[in-house]
Amino acid sequence: MTGDSYEVEYFPTEIEDTLARAIDPLPQAIYQSALAKILEGTIGERDYLEIARLSGITPEDAKARAAFVEHAFSQQADSVARREGISDPQELWDWAQKARPDAYSRARHELVYGRNVAPMKALAREFFSANPPSVEALRKAGYEVSTTPAGHTVVNINGRLVSPAAAAKLGWL
């Protein structure tokens, strides 16, 4: 994964507007700190109390706003994964946390702070390379899958018969 790829993707307008309203009362430094804690999974009751105190909102409101922000970015990440062909995004994120924790952390930060989806897409491609889709998944996606006389599974990609693993590694799926 290179650090040079950049592909900005914003939320749909209604989500952007709701997100802007959710973070509006928060001073920028408080918002940045809360985002960092959300990304680390360490935001807690003390943080909500602090956000409330510094922003003039209730702790419950602070918690609800943080939950909305977290949900919005999680949904965006899942949407990126699905568009890349991942039927169950949670499988990708579980794999990335174990197999590529630094890249996963960077991808989440790039998404949240820069709206850059390129690192998420790169993780999806790596996931496919490491975990070729099943025959069932390939057929469901409309690929022609067959078995060679030697018993090997092959998928037809634009007239070329290749193993699902090779097709995934080449980025053909």
Image (cartoon, rainbow, N blue to C red):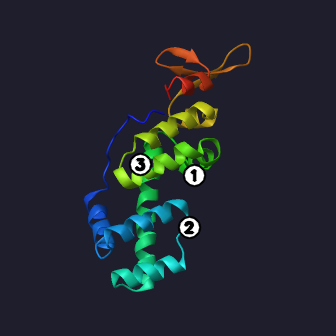
Mark closer to the chain start, 2 or 3: 2
Reading the image, the residue beneath label 1 is: 90
Residue at image point 42% right, 58% down:
73
Q: Residues within 10 Å of mark 2 (few under 14, many from 20)?
A: few
What percent of the width, then of the height, locates residue 134? 63, 35
Residue at image point 73% right, 18% down:
151
Mark closer to the chain start, 1 or 3: 1
Task: Count the labels in the image.
Answer: 3
Mark closer to the chain start, 2 or 1: 2
Label 1 to label 3: alpha-carbon separation: 19 Å
What percent of the width, then of the height, locates residue 106? 48, 47
Q: Residues within 10 Å of mark 3 (few under 14, many from 20)?
A: some
What percent of the width, then of the height, locates residue 2? 45, 33
The three-letter code of the residue at mark 3 reads Glu
Residue 68 vs 150, above or below: the answer is: below
Reading the image, the residue beneath label 2 is: 42
The three-letter code of the residue at mark 1 reads Gln
CB-based contact (under 8 Å), mark 1 and mark 3 = no
In front: mark 2 or mark 1?
2
Residue at image point 45% right, 41% down:
119
Nearest the camera: 148 or 59?
Answer: 59
The three-letter code of the residue at mark 2 reads Thr
